[in-house]
Each structure stands twice: as C-alpha cells, then as structure tokens.
Amino acid sequence: MELLSVVVPCYNEMETVDIFYDALCKVLKTMDKDYEIIFVNDGSKDQTLEKLKAIYDKANGKVKIIDFSRNFGKEGALLAGLRYAKGDYVTVMDADMQDPPEYLPKMFETMEKNGDDIVGSRRVTRKGEPPIRSWFARRFYRLINRFTEVEIVDGARDFRLMKRQVVDAILQLNEYGRFSKGLFAWVGFKTEYLEYENIERVAGETKWSFWKLFRYALDGIVEYTNVPLALASFVGGFLTFVMFIELLVLLVLSLNGKVITNTTLVLSVVLFLGGIILLAIGIVGEYLGKTYNEVKKRPNYIVKKYYD
Ligand code: UDP
Ligand code: MG
C-alpha cells in the first residue's frame, strides 16, 4: 500500500492538537492509503509536547514526533518534517484546523483525475482577518509577482499534497532563508489549487503578529528577487543626472547675474538625497544580511529528540 506522510508543525498548540488528531484520523481511516503523522514540536512553551506524547503512546507507530531544542519558526519545522517523511505522498497541515482534513480525499481525487504533482489549497476569502492585514497581504502578492519570475499565488496556504518527486526537489534546495511559498513555486511541477473560504482556528491564537508577517513578506521579496538592488542604483543614477543638470542651470543663471540664495531649496535637496542614500544602503544591507546568513551555513533547526 502507498504511504502518506502528514507533516504538522506545532508551536504552543496544546488546545488544538487533540481536536486536530481526532479529525485527521477520522479522515485517514476512510482512505485507501497507509499513513504516518509527523508532529514537529517547534519549541512550544506550553503542554504541547505532553499532549503529543499521549497521542504517540496510543497510535501504534503511526505517529512520530520531532522535538526541537527551541522555537525555530514554521519554516524550520516544515523542513524537518519533509526530511523525516518517508511517504510516497506528503502533505503539510497546520494544527489549528484551518487546513480542514476533509480536503485530503478531495486533493487525492483531483491529483489522480488531472495527473497533478502538487495539489495546493487556496483561500478565496480572508474572512475573520483584520482588514489591514488583508490589505498588506494583497499588496505583497502584487509586488512579489511583479518582480519575480516564480508565480506566488495569492491566498495559497502551505496546506498541500505532494508527490515524492516534488518533496525530493524541495529538499535539494538547501538555502538557509526558506520562504516556502517561493520554494514550492520555484520547483515547478504541475500544480492545481483547490479553493475554499477562510476558516478561523478552532482554539488558541495565531503566532503571527503584524510585524512578524511584515518581516516575513520582506524576506520573501529579498530572497526571490534582486530588483530592489537595481532599483536603488537606478534611482541613484537618475538623481545624480538630474542634480548635474541642475548645477549646470544654476551655473548659467549665476553667470547671468542672478543671485541664488534659496537655502530652503538647498536644504530640501540635501535631505531628499540623504533619504535616497539611506534607502539604497538599507536595501544593500538587507541583501548583505541574507548573504551573511547563507554563508554561515547554520542548520535551520536542532532536533532534541526524535520519537520514532
Ligand atoms: N507554527 C510553528 N512555529 C512557529 C509559528 C507557528 O510551528 O514559530 C505553526 C503553528 O503551530 C500552526 C502553523 O504553524 O500549526 C500556523 O501557525 P498560525 O496558525 O499561528 O498561523 P496563521 O494560520 O495565523 O497564519
Ligand atoms: Mg492558523
């Protein structure tokens, strides 16, 4: 029988893991696949690990736990899960029921019917989300898709079903800064999205503050395109040219006897230029920081214990 691996990153999910596990098992039992569930405990500070161990004890080898030494973030947890997964098919799901397990059979159906390599999920509404968060999210997708050659689908969640070949391809990408939405798009393959309405988490609260998300979006842009770097040099070059012309004009004017004493003008020009220079340095800094992280070649996570 073919094996399906379900990877579940968990950070402070003690209120949701039991509900999730029960719902998932109910669905998995109706399917004609063998399965393993890999919970990644991403350094939870609550009772998540104890809850997971209780599940592990009653699951007769179908559940594995990867316990991290601290919180490394969802991307690290996903990577660990994909590395440990042995399945012919692998799926990635959140523990908070925002990725409904009932969709799994539908995903398989779509995959078989259309010969897809990846079946993803995409929420068409952002119901229940703060409006400014939605607004920024939409801007982000517009921006990143304009600048990069990979297409990152608006509203696509990490919840997706993949064939072994796709997982192996993802694991070949060994950069440190991992932006999953980009990685999945970058490897290609025949991908299809199932659409659904946004579902709010059953319990607990989101681990993403506005600034954490903002930072995440910025990382995504910096990791997938060098356009901002080019933009800095373009703006810089353009301004130098304009300033050069302006100086020529001023020179001609003063040669013709006009006195130029507009301090305000000079001051604003200086401030303007200062701003541009800082912007350019900031952009270079972002890329330098990324390069620094890559060069260090640190692992994305440390496993404290693996419950096989
Ligand atoms: N998560 C994680 N490490 C983190 C933050 C989140 O493993 O540092 C997990 C979390 O337990 C959940 C999933 O990633 O299973 C998605 O997190 P969340 O529901 O908070 O994000 P949202 O759905 O609000 O985008
Ligand atoms: Mg969630």
Image: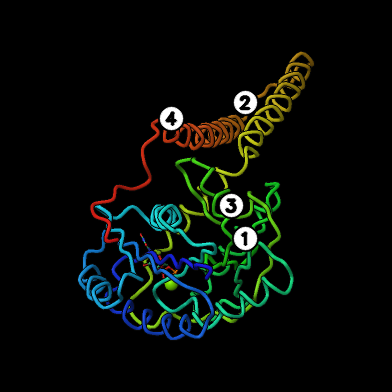
Image height of 291 relative to 37, above or below: above
Residue closer to the observer: 294 or 260: 294
- Image quadrant assignment for residue 191: bottom right
Residue 222 picture location, percent across and down: 55, 43
Query: At 60% across and 32% down in the image, what residue appears?
Result: 269
Where in the figure is residue 58, as x and y percent of width and height? 26, 78
Where residue 22 appears, x then y in whole percent? 37, 84
Q: Residues within 10 Å of mark 2 (few under 14, many from 20)?
A: few
**SS under mark 4:** helix
Q: Residue at x 78, y 17 (%)?
A: 252
Reading the image, the residue beneath label 3 is 182
Q: Nearer the viewer, residue 186 or 219?
A: 186
The colour scheme used here is: rainbow
Question: Which residue matches tag 1?
Answer: 139
CA gap, disc 3 and disc 4: 20 Å
The residue beneath circle 4 is: 295
Q: Are marks 1 and 3 in contact (CB under 8 Å)?
A: no
| CB atoms of marks 4 and 1 within 8 Å | no
With 204 as the anchor, is 283 left or right in this view?
right
Q: Quadrant of residue 212?
A: bottom left
Instruction: Specify the amino acid type for callout 1.
Output: Arg
In the displayed structure, 125 sits above or below 291; it is below
Instruction: Tell me the amino acid under the disc marked 2.
Output: Thr
Q: Residues within 10 Å of mark 3 (few under 14, many from 20)?
A: some
Give me the C-alpha separation between circle 2 and circle 3. Answer: 53 Å
